[in-house]
């Protein structure tokens, strides 16, 4: 329950407040300053505020900014002058929605006539305002539509005579109306004035006022066909729409002429043209159709098209035609047709569903072609192709066809297997240079481009071919163009033969030829060595032996000792030469077999030094063995004896008096490196490159004029390499030579 509300000395009772609460109108009571003292239930419902949210506040809380300050100034002036103010408000509710109100605001006085506040009684007219605005918008839209319509629109009122309608008068018309009928200013005119050539009977005049009508007239003066539509409008009014249908009429006439031409063309067309209904019954067939089926037209019309199909094809043909829709209106069918004479023909039909304006299929049109000659050609082509495929796929050569861009378009099975692919389709994603080894690509591409440019008619190329797994084989490739009837290159065919065995044979022959040439050169070298280096020691031996034999009694002991030493040196040189020749011959015959074992390196060096102790002493060359006892190698013992002996002999040979030869060893990785270092004459840099080659060896005399063949060094290098090692030589002329022999420590 509300408490009593007081304005000064005036009091509003609870009964009055309860009555206001149940009022459908919105009621607001304020004091003289506009502060709200009371609102009723309708306010709470419409505005969404609770009473305690608005009490003590002014109606400015609801302002929507729709009205300006003058509007409110006039309101306050009126009610402060104790007068009633009437008007409309566009306010805003608590939720932010707009509300339109029709308001009456009165001043409130007490029993002494003093002004104590104001009461506002307001009616919600929001929906009414929305309808008014919509009506205004609709009226404006209709007026715009009326004035701007391209169709002529006129409002007519009937003209009566003795209660009978005799004509109609135009009371309103849009601008297009006069344009359509070729007259400006038709308002006020009668229809009979506007359309003098068109007259309506009395019955039709009465019907215009009751229902919709359509009619048409031809205005000869302006050469137009006008179409009219009327319907009753309001009380005693008729709305008339009229528009120019001359283009439509002209189109109809053109269609009629076109249809005549169409039937002429269809009748004379070489294609088989027919029309039939949903059941396949022929409605029309042109002359070509009749000739193809060897039937007269009058016998053909009314026949079923499916009668031409073999029994097993009829159901499928019906299903294809009946599945056509307005959206998918076309199908293509091929079948064999059996004529009345028993002859069989191949036919192809393009069937089209004909659709009316409502989207319903009312008929079918079919355009056919006799494929019999084409089918015969296809069968012959297939036979030829099968023969060609059999030849191509069974040939021992690989065959590939590429486009002018180098893309594969066809390969035979042998090519597929040569390249190592599982299917031909994989190859069709490749281009021809993918299968050419990189070192041959430039040559292959150059030849291909020359062929396309017409510079060559074809070409052959022997090159390495890459398989899918990146392995290679040698191929003999013959490439030639495929041309069209105009002589333009459309494709390129390549025929490839695997010549790997041929190439291997050629390479073997070449290697053997080179080996033979090398052997011949070596033989010549050996004969030269034998003729020169063996002859000289024997001359020395024979000469000194003859002197001793003839004059032994005449020589002193010292002279005899000197001659004997010369004979010994000559014999030693001959023996070493023969030993080298025998070992070399053994290596050439493939009889030099490596038999590795573990042994100490120092013992071999000691043995070699002991062998050449006298020679070194005679030359006053010091031999030093710094190899440690613990150095063990894994190699062929006899070969290593030969190697160390030859290298130490060479070091003594090229070292002068007071010189020295030092043997030492060091471990490097898995190798023991034996160093044989002398302080001799050294080796020129240009000679180091051919030091171990027997063919390029140039014999050099030692510091005491010792002779050599070069076989020892050649054989030493070969033996070390056979044991998995290598030899390096470092030398400076006048400072000596250091030979480094890398020998394996462990079994490899």
Image: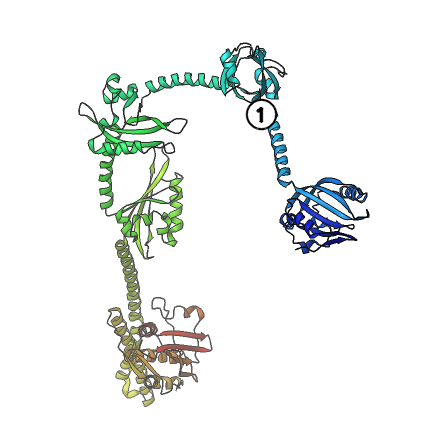
Above-or-below relation of 281 to 607:
above
Q: Residue at x 68, y 56 (%)?
A: 52
x then y, percent, for residue 707 = 35, 75
Question: As drawn, which residue projects farthest toward the bottom?
Answer: 557
Q: Nearer the viewer, residue 145 or 354?
A: 145
The reply to whether residue 498 is visible in this rendering is no
Q: Is residue 46 left or right of residue 737?
A: right
Q: Nearer the viewer, residue 738 or 357?
A: 357
x then y, percent, for residue 185 = 64, 16
x then y, percent, for residue 348 = 28, 29
Q: Which residue is mark 1?
A: 149
Name the quadrant of the N terminus.
bottom right
Q: Is residue 373 left or right of residue 263?
A: left
Q: Secondary structure at mark 1?
A: loop
Find residue 540 and report its image quarter: bottom left
Question: As drawn, which residue projects farthest toward the left?
Answer: 342
Above-or-below relation of 123 to 528:
above
Q: Residue at x 37, y 84 (%)?
A: 616
The reply to whether residue 159 is visible in this rendering is yes
Badge 1 density bin: few <14, some 14–19, many ≥20, Cα 10 Å = some
Name the quadrant of the C terminus.
bottom left
Q: Nearer the viewer, residue 471 or 639?
A: 471
Find residue 664 and report its image quarter: bottom left
Find residue 55 and report its image quarter: bottom right
């Amino acid at each position: 329950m509300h408490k009593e509300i007081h304005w000064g000395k005036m009091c509003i009772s609870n009964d009055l407040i309860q009555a206001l609460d149940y009022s459908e109108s919105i009621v607001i009571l304020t004091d003289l300053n506009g502060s709200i003292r009371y609102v009723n239930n309708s306010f709470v419902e419409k505005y969404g505020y609770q009473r305690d949210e608005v009490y003590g506040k002014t109606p400015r809380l609801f302002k929507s900014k729709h009205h300006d300050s003058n509007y409110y100034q006039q309101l306050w002036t009126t009610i402060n002058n104790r007068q009633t103010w009437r008007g409309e408000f566009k306010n805003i509710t608590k939720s932010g929605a707009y509300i339109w109100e029709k308001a009456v605001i009165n001043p409130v006085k007490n029993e002494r006539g003093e002004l104590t506040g104001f009461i506002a009684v307001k009616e919600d007219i929001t929906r009414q305002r929305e309808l008014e605005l919509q009506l205004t918008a609709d009226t404006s839209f209709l007026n715009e539509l009326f004035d701007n319509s391209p169709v002529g629109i006129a409002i007519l009122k009937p003209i009566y005579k003795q209660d009978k309608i005799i004509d109609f008068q135009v009371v309103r018309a849009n601008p297009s109306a006069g344009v359509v009928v070729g007259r400006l200013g038709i308002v006020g005119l009668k229809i009979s004035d506007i359309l003098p050539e068109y007259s309506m009977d009395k019955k039709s005049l009465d019907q215009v006022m009751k229902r919709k009508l359509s009619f048409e007239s031809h205005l000869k003066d302006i050469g137009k066909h006008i179409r009219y539509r009327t319907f009753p409008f309001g009380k005693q009014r008729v709305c008339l729409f009229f528009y120019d249908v001359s283009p439509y009429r002209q189109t109809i006439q053109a269609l009629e002429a076109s249809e005549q031409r169409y039937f002429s063309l269809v009748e004379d067309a070489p294609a088989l043209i027919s029309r039939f209904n949903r059941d396949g019954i022929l409605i029309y067939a042109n002359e070509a159709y009749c000739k193809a089926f060897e039937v007269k037209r009058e016998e053909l019309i009314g026949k079923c098209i499916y009668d031409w199909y073999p029994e097993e094809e009829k159901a499928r043909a019906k299903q294809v035609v009946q599945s056509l829709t307005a959206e998918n209106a076309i199908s293509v069918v091929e079948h064999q047709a059996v004529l009345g004479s028993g002859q069989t023909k191949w036919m192809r039909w393009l069937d089209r569903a004909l659709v009316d304006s409502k989207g319903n299929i009312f008929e079918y049109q079919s355009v056919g072609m006799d494929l019999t000659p084409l089918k015969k050609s296809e069968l012959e082509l297939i036979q030829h192709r099968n023969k060609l495929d059999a030849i191509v796929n069974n040939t021992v050569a690989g065959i590939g066809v590429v486009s002018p861009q180098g893309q594969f378009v066809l390969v035979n099975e042998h090519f597929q297997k040569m390249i190592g692919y599982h299917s031909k389709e994989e190859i069709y994603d490749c281009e021809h240079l993918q299968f050419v080894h990189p070192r041959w690509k430039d040559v292959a591409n150059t030849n291909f481009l020359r062929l396309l440019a017409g510079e060559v008619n074809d070409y052959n190329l022997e090159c390495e071919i890459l398989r899918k797994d990146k392995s290679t084989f040698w191929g003999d490739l013959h490439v030639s163009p495929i041309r069209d009837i105009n002589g333009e290159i459309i494709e390129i065919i390549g025929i490839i033969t695997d010549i790997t065995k041929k190439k291997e044979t050629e390479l073997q022959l070449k290697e053997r030829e080179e080996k033979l040439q090398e052997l011949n050169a070596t033989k010549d070298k050996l004969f030269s060595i034998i003729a020169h280096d063996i002859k000289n020691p024997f001359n020395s031996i024979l000469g000194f032996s003859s002197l001793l034999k003839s004059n032994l009694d005449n020589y002193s002991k010292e002279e005899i000792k000197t001659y004997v030493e010369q004979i010994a040196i000559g014999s030693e040189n001959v023996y070493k030469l023969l030993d080298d020749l025998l070992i070399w011959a053994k290596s050439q015959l493939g009889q030099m077999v490596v038999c590795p074992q573990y042994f100490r390196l120092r013992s071999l060096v000691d043995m070699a030094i002991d062998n050449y102790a006298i020679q070194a002493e005679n030359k006053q060359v010091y031999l030093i063995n710094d190899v440690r006892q613990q150095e063990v190698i894994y190699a062929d013992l006899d070969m290593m004896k030969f190697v160390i002996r030859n290298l130490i002999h060479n070091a003594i040979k090229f070292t002068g008096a007071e010189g020295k030869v030092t043997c030492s060893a060091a471990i490097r990785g898995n190798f023991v490196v034996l160093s044989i270092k002398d302080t001799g004459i050294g080796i020129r840099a240009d000679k180091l490159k051919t030091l171990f080659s027997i063919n390029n060896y140039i014999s050099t005399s030692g510091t005491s004029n010792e002779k050599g063949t070069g076989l020892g060094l050649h054989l030493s290098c070969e033996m070390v390499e056979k044991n998995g090692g290598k030899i390096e030589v470092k030398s400076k002329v006048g400072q000596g030579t250091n030979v480094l022999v890398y020998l394996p420590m462990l079994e490899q």
